[in-house]
Amino acid sequence: ARRYGPPIKGTKPVSKSGGVMRKTIDYFFSPASGFTYLGHQALMALAAEVGAMVRFHPMDIRKVYAEMGTTHPLEQCEARQSYRIEDQRRWARLRGLRMTPNPAHHPVDVRLPCRVILATGRLGLDQDAVTLACLRGVWAEGRNISDPGDLGEALRQIDLPAYDILHEAEAEDVRDEADAVTQSAIEAEIFGSPTYVVDGERFWGQDRIEFMREKLLRAAA
């Protein structure tokens, strides 16, 4: 089983139980992933329910796939792609989310939004809200989150200081941190988005949240 070191600088607890941290969920994701969008709010709700801390690991999924020798492991044919659209439609209906089947800007370069999410944590701001803004931007608002202007507008829409976050995101140490996060995902054998890790156990896909809930509740009992 893989283990993880200290939290990435700037991450923060979702909730606490009795003032003592219970469990940590390492959240590996691409800021443009449709299934990450579908599961994000359910993940954060689970973390609050069980008093867990979420550590955000936004990764450059292209590098992860390149390490695997593929552009995308699950979209090698039209049949798989059409099934992905059907499945996302079902989950969006179940989650009560607005979701377009074919976003105007997808696939998209996620290096900037990855750095923005990390920069948000460094500034002590809400990584949950920024992550959702990126995901919602792609899948519900038609945004190009690789464009600083479009991404900045998404940040202003949730009342966060877009200029400060985007400026911090360009710092060399943030760039280094973003590269390190993606490399850590590769070394941890993360192969898809989203992947949640609890005590070294991987849960790939937002449809595995119930399995993670069972593990966390069992640990808390």
Image: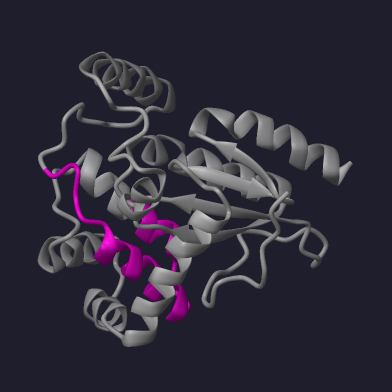
Question: Residue 180, relative to residue 204: is it above or below?
Answer: below
Residue displayed at 66% across by 73% down: 6
Membership of 112 in magenta stretch: yes
Q: Going by the picture, which residue comes out furthest to the right?
A: 221
Is 9 placed left or right of 90 in the picture? right
In the picture as drawn, the residue positioned furthest to the front comes out as 69
- Relative to 175, residue 211 above or below: above
Above or below — where is 127 with respect to 209?
Answer: below
Q: Residue at x 41, y 44 (%)?
A: 68
Q: Which of the two residues, 83 or 51, is positioned nearer the viewer here? A: 83
Q: Position of residue 61 (x, y in %)?
A: 35, 50
Which region is colored magenta?
A: 105-132
Picture quadrant of residue 216: top right
**Residue 13 placement: quadrant:** bottom right
Seen in the image, is 149 located left or right of residue 119?
left
Residue 115 among magenta residues: yes
Point 17% across, 60% down: residue: 146
Going by the image, does 45 lie left or right of 165?
A: right
* Residue closest to the far bottom: 172
The C terminus is located in which quarter?
Answer: top right
Q: How many marks?
A: 0
Q: Position of residue 98 (x, y in %)?
A: 27, 31
Q: Position of residue 105 (x, y in %)?
A: 13, 44
Q: Is residue 201 left or right of residue 18?
A: left
Residue at the location (36% across, 28% down)? Answer: 74
Using the image as rendered, state which of residue 211 and residue 14 is in the foreground: 211
Q: Main secondary structure of the magenta part?
A: helix
